[in-house]
Amino acid sequence: MLAAYAENYRDLWNNHWWWQVRRRFVLRLLDALAARRPLKSILDVGCGDGLFFEQLSRYGEIRGVEADAGLVDPSGPWASRVTIAPFGSSYPDDRRYDLVLMLDSLEHIEDDRGAARRAHDLLEPGGFLLLTVPALQSLWSVHDAANRHFRRYDKAALRAVLESAGFEIETLSFYFGWPVLPMYARKLLGGRRGESRAGDYAVLPPPRPLNGLLYAASALEQALTGLKGTPIGSSLFAVARRPRI
């Protein structure tokens, strides 16, 4: 992640409509999973500075892994629970978890199949993987370049990654449906000029009235679609399970 982008990450997590809506959606999914199986131990892959840990800790014991040391405050309240290391097929951990959480982190890993296999191996039998990724390679933009993504996913590609790792997929669907048309329009109007500006790219929360409006639009969409997702979207989410046998 670019340094200028990383500097704003806490502000984005706390205040940007997209991060707020994703967090709200993920917590609804977690509530549904916790009703089926206690989530006593959780691994958050790509956890940053443990920004989600306080809310996750109500489900169980939380640990995290973060590849970008610049995102982790060594004096922060959760620093002792964050391992700074790349996540992949050789990630060292002798613990087992009831839930592995990967929120927009798989696209940052070149060997995504190796990372999915490692997530599978770290789960208790019957444990869950919950992940979100950016969707539709045709939506690739300066945002992806600045964030050092390797790819965006469609359903077939994400399904192939998860099934190759041994997961049973329970849910795989798009969400953030309404932003797709504005994103295509921006891409069409901007052409390819944005790719050369990746080094200067930065994101800030929009002005408060616009931020609130965009949050409301996404919250309404989720209220109408529930946890089933949307027919098309700028993101994908999946709930997958390690088989018990």
Image (spheres, rainbow, N blue to C red):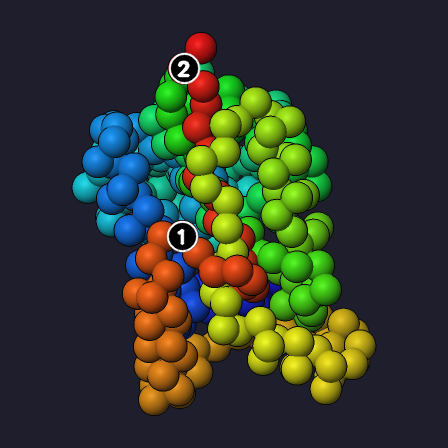
Q: Is residue 45 above or below residue 19?
A: above
Q: Is residue 111 visible?
A: yes
Q: Is residue 173 above or below residue 215?
A: above
| Residue 158 image offset from top left, x and y in percent | 62, 42
* Residue at image point 50% right, 50% down: 173
| Residue 213 image offset from top left, x and y in percent | 36, 83
Q: Classify residue 164 as left or right of residue 52.
A: right
Image quadrant of residue 89? top right
Q: Secondary structure at mark 2?
A: loop
Q: Quadrant of the C terminus?
A: top left
| Residue 121 image offset from top left, x and y in percent | 51, 20
Q: Is residue 6 above or below residue 95?
A: below
- Check if mark 2's residue and mark 1's residue have beta carbons within 8 Å: no
Q: Classify residue 75 as left or right of residue 35.
A: right
Q: Is residue 73 visible?
A: no
Amino acid at pointer 1: Lys
* Residue at image point 58% right, 33% down: 162
Q: Secondary structure at mark 1?
A: loop
* Residue at image point 73% right, 81% down: 188
Q: Which residue lies under the disc numbered 2?
A: 244
Q: Residues within 10 Å of mark 2 (few under 14, many from 20)?
A: few
| Residue 102 image offset from top left, x and y in percent | 47, 42
Q: Residues within 10 Å of mark 1 (few under 14, many from 20)?
A: some
Q: Which residue lies under the disc numbered 1?
A: 228
Q: Considering depth in this image, is 193 or 202 the residue closer to the camera?
A: 193
Q: Is residue 49 above or below residue 215?
A: above
In three-dimensional space, the C-alpha distance between marks 2 and 1, rounded to whole angstroms, equals 25 Å
Of circles 2 and 1, the one toward us is 1
* Residue at image point 40% right, 52% down: 228
Q: Considering depth in this image, is 217 or 19 the residue closer to the camera?
A: 217
Q: Quadrant of the N terminus?
A: bottom right
